Image (cartoon, rainbow, N blue to C red):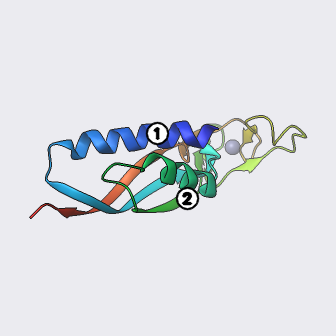
């Protein structure tokens, strides 16, 4: 499961980050994922639940924000959302991204990110 390995990386990065801080319990984790990561929110939440067992993340809430993909076309100068070509293999392959204006392959400027944007934690007294 793709989501599980992504979440595992995020969780271990977070635990590393919080290791030398006086955190008793994490209440909320906010992450942002790009539309082009094709990660499922429910699967991420499930993975988060599994991975936060027996550590300071246990019982925390995971908030997922999905960022729309944004591209820039060097051919015609278009900048904005993406269109996907009608590939019948869409569900099995990474879809082909093309410029909605001219059909060339644009440069992706947003939509592939996976990042932790905030954590609400309770400090040890
Ligand atoms: Zn274009």
Q: Residue at x 19, y 55 (%)?
A: 23
Q: Is mark 1 within 8 Å of ligand 1?
A: no
Numbered disc total = 2
- The secondary structure type at the circle numbered 2 is strand
Quarter of the image where the C terminus is located:
bottom left
Q: Are marks 1 and 2 in contact (CB under 8 Å)?
A: no
Quarter of the image where the N terminus is located:
top right
Percent of width and height locating residue 101: 74, 50
Mark 2 crowd level (few <14, some 14–19, many ≥20, 10 Å Cα)? many
Comes first in the chain, label 1 or label 2:
1
Percent of width and height locating residue 48: 49, 51
Question: Which label belongs to residue 28?
Answer: none
Q: Residue furthest left?
A: 125
Q: Residue at x 30, y 43 (%)?
A: 15
- The secondary structure type at the circle numbered 1 is helix
Pick whichever, 53 or 100, lies toward us. 53
Placement of 73 over or under 100, stated as above or below: above
Disc 2 target residue:
66
Q: Residue at x 42, y 47 (%)?
A: 115
Pick whichever, 64 or 89, lies toward us. 64
Give the quarter of the image for residue 10: top left
Q: Is residue 30 left or right of residue 71?
A: left
Give the quarter of the image for residue 122: bottom left
Q: Quadrant for ligand 1?
A: top right
Give the quarter of the image for residue 95: top right
Mark 1 crowd level (few <14, some 14–19, many ≥20, 10 Å Cα)? some
Placement of 54 over or under 9, stated as above or below: below
Q: Is residue 72 left or right of residue 92?
A: left
Q: Residue at x 42, y 50 (%)?
A: 53
Placement of 34 over or under 27, stated as above or below: above
Disc 1 target residue:
8
Q: Residue furthest right?
A: 88
């Amino acid at each position: 499961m793709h989501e599980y390995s992504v979440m595992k990386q995020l969780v271990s990065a977070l635990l590393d980050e919080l290791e030398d801080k006086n955190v008793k319990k994490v209440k909320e984790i906010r992450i942002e994922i790009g539309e082009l990561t094709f990660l499922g929110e429910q699967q991420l939440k499930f993975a988060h639940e599994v991975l936060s067992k027996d550590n300071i993340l246990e019982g925390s809430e995971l908030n997922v924000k999905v960022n729309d993909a944004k591209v820039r076309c060097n051919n015609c100068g278009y900048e904005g959302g993406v269109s996907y070509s009608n590939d019948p293999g869409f569900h099995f392959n990474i879809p082909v991204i093309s410029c909605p204006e001219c059909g060339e392959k644009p440069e992706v400027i947003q939509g592939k990110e996976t990042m932790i944007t905030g954590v609400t934690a309770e400090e040890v007294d």
